[in-house]
Amino acid sequence: MLALDATHQLLAILCGSLVGASLALIGGGGSILALPLLLYVVGLRDPHLAIGTSALVVSINAFANLIPHARAGHVRWREAAAFALAGVLGALAGSSLGKWLDGQRLLMLFAALMLVVAALMWRRRPVVALPPPARRFSRLGSVGALTGGLAGFFGIGGGFLVVPGLMFAGGLDIVEAIGSALLAVGAFGATTAINYAASGLIDWRIAVEFIGGGLVGGWLGAMGAHRLARRRGVLNRLLAVVIATVALLMLWREVGRL
């Protein structure tokens, strides 16, 4: 029993490190792996419990990874705050709806979303023209609310949507968008986690272990962010392949349970 507990603890720490490193390196992507990692590697059985735990983990890791990016001057605070504030309302509504939906159906929808994310990450991000200031913050609000709703519904940080959303709505370059996205990812995850915690749907012990690994992975990822900046496209595509593979495995497993 002790050996089994030690194995689960190690798995939680290693999985958390992977998520934290991805958040720091490319601003998202890895957070969408937190849910399947908690379910199929760490061993949480209840999808809603895994979603609540995942949301808490992603939130803490995002806020922790925000610090080195802020110190490096990579955060556009006004744009990030506008995006996050609008998205928090969406995350509250989305997470309430997610708790109501059957867990198995939610996982199948989540796997389908992962395939969409993988396709978006595979494509190169286009250069986005800077919108006029008067339209910038209305765009940030509307895109933020939609992104927050999806993040809350699936219990993810939504960095894969926040980064291009900030580039499109706020005119941020890729480095600024990655740093600024972490504020929104943290806010969306915190909103979802609070909503799920109110229903007792967080495994606090596993969350602490996962977060510990994420802090280490995030620190290492932040150190490599500058060195790997020119290879970020390669990292995106590699992670896209991983996400698509996990999504297909999830669909195969959940469809087999029908």
Image (cartoon, helix red, strand yellow):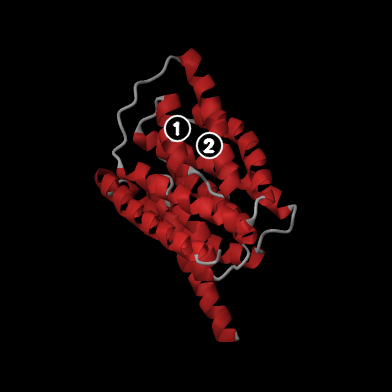
Question: Which of the two discs, 2 and 1, labels the residue nearer the N terminus?
Answer: 2
* Residue 219 image offset from top left, x and y in percent: 43, 55
* Residue behind mark 2: 147
**Residue lying at 41% horizontally and 27% vertically, measured from the top left:** 168
Q: Residues within 10 Å of mark 1 (few under 14, many from 20)?
A: many
Instruction: Indicate which disc residue 165 carries.
Output: 1
The answer to the question of whether label 2 and label 1 lie on touching residues, with beta carbons closer than 8 A, is: yes
Along the horizontal axis of the image, is 244 left or right of 6?
Answer: left
Which of the 4 image quarters holds residue 167? top left
257 is higher (above) or lower (below) than 83: below
**Residue lying at 51% horizontally and 26% vertically, measured from the top left:** 140
Whether residue 213 can be seen here: no
* Residue 239 image offset from top left, x and y in percent: 35, 53
Say which of 188 and 154 sits in front: 154
**Quarter occupied by the C terminus:** bottom right
How much space separates mark 2 and mark 1, taking CA atoms?
8 Å
Say which of 61 and 141 sits in front: 141
